[in-house]
């Protein structure tokens, strides 16, 4: 499988399958404070007016969110938003009357603070890999007009979501869902662009110029007969330095990572009813169907044929 325009982040995002999007706004005034219970999925929010303090449950540190800032909450922990840094607050359920798509809650008469954003669920094996590398809170600060390339798109997405929430035009639910996905992608881009110095994990690997080159090569051509030596050459490192650096940042050896992604993409093809097991194997670089079956079962816990049977019987996509 060769795709010269593919890249690691796009491949992960393609397998995340965000769904069940719920978008909402908050218009607050005065000395307000809200506690949000633990939530399923990922939340992405942007501050369009004013500012507030964010406190994650279990943390004694508060984070200030100002106008134009965005925050991503990947792990569903409970948190408090407040005007003056309170540690407790009104239950969100009493402020947001129902978790309905398109609701804007008004608290304290509104007027001082406005936030909008979305929560969506993520599915698939790729979500586990991505979410495991993310911190509890990702804050993307507003920058000047000459800031990062993602900034303009982030501001546009947040503003458009707020407009859709306010006008409730035909098709607004679908528009908000797509805008929320754009917002997530741009926030992830900015997270990577802001650097991951001293961090480990998949996102840190993407931010590393050497390992990123190897990851990009893998994702552009999964069928290529890669070796540690050829990937080290792409990265611009010696074989030993590359293997150590890759394992430290990614948490897997280069060959384990390659196999993992080959099996994910083969499973995606089989999940969508795309040809035979032999064809899926060939597409990700396996001339032997038996060798592919062994690798598939070792990675995903079942044989390709069993995977296809379960997908067909469930009637839903699994990857």
Image: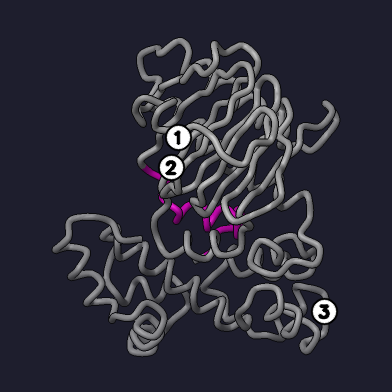
Residue 252 quadrant: bottom right
Q: Mark 3 near mark 2, Cβ–Cβ under 8 Å? A: no
Q: CA distance from mark 1 to mark 3?
A: 53 Å
Secondary structure, mark 3, is loop
The stretch in magenta equals: 2-19
Give me the disc on residue 237.
Answer: 3
How far across and how far down the image is residue 19, in percent?
38, 43
In the rendered image, the vertical position of residue 33 relative to residue 286, given as above or below: above
The residue lying toward the viewer, choosing from 86 and 48, is 86
Which residue carries the number 1 mark?
Answer: 91
Q: Mark 1 near mark 2, Cβ–Cβ under 8 Å? A: no
Position of residue 204 in the picture relative to residue 109 (left or right): right
How far across and how far down the image is residue 288, in percent?
38, 87
The residue lying toward the viewer, choosing from 196 and 24, is 24
Q: Residues within 10 Å of mark 2 (few under 14, many from 20)?
A: many
Q: Residues within 10 Å of mark 3 (few under 14, many from 20)?
A: some
Which residue carries the number 2 mark?
Answer: 120
Which of label 1 and label 2 is nearer to you? Answer: 1
How far across and how far down the image is residue 269, in percent?
35, 63
The residue lying toward the viewer, choosing from 276 and 100, is 100
Q: CA distance from mark 1 to mark 2?
A: 20 Å
Q: Pick whichever of labels 3 and 2 is earlier in the sequence.
A: 2
User: In percent of the image, x 73 and y 70: which residue is there?
Assistant: 211
User: In percent of the image, x 29 and y 75: which residue is there?
Assistant: 277
Q: How is the image coloured?
A: one colour
Secondary structure, mark 1, is strand
Q: Pick whichever of labels 1 and 3 is earlier in the sequence.
A: 1
Residue 312 quadrant: bottom left
Position of residue 268 in the picture relative to residue 79 (left or right): left
Q: Residues within 10 Å of mark 1 (few under 14, many from 20)?
A: some
How far across and how far down the image is residue 111, in percent?
61, 11
């Amino acid at each position: 499988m060769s795709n010269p325009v593919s890249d690691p982040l796009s491949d992960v995002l393609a397998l995340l399958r965000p769904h069940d999007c719920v978008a909402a706004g908050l218009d607050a005034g005065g000395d307000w404070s809200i506690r949000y219970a633990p939530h399923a999925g990922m939340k992405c929010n942007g501050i369009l007016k004013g500012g507030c303090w964010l406190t994650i449950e279990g943390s004694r540190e508060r984070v200030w969110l100002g106008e134009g800032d965005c925050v991503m909450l990947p792990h569903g922990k409970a948190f408090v938003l407040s005007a003056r840094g309170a540690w407790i607050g009104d239950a969100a359920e009493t402020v947001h009357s129902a978790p309905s798509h398109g609701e804007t809650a008004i608290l304290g008469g509104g007027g001082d603070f406005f936030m909008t954003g979305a929560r969506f669920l993520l599915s698939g094996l790729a979500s586990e890999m991505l979410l495991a590398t993310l911190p509890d809170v990702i804050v993307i600060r507003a920058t000047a007009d000459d800031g990062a390339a993602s900034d303009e798109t982030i501001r546009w997405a947040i503003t458009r979501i707020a407009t859709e929430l306010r006008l409730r035009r035909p098709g607004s639910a679908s528009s908000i869902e797509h805008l929320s996905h754009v917002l997530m992608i741009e926030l992830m881009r900015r997270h990577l662009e802001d650097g991951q110095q001293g961090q480990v994990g998949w996102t840190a690997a993407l931010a590393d110029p050497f390992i990123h080159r190897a990851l990009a090569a893998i994702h552009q051509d999964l069928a290529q007969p890669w070796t540690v030596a050829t990937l080290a050459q792409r990265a611009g490192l010696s074989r030993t330095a590359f293997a150590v650096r890759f394992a430290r940042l990614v948490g897997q050896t280069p060959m384990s990572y390659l196999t993992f992604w080959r099996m994910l993409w083969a499973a995606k093809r089989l999940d969508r009813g795309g040809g035979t097991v032999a064809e899926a194997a060939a597409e990700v670089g396996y001339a032997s169907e038996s060798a592919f079956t062994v690798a598939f079962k070792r990675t995903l816990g079942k044989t390709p044929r069993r995977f296809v049977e379960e997908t067909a019987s469930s009637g839903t996509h699994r990857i």
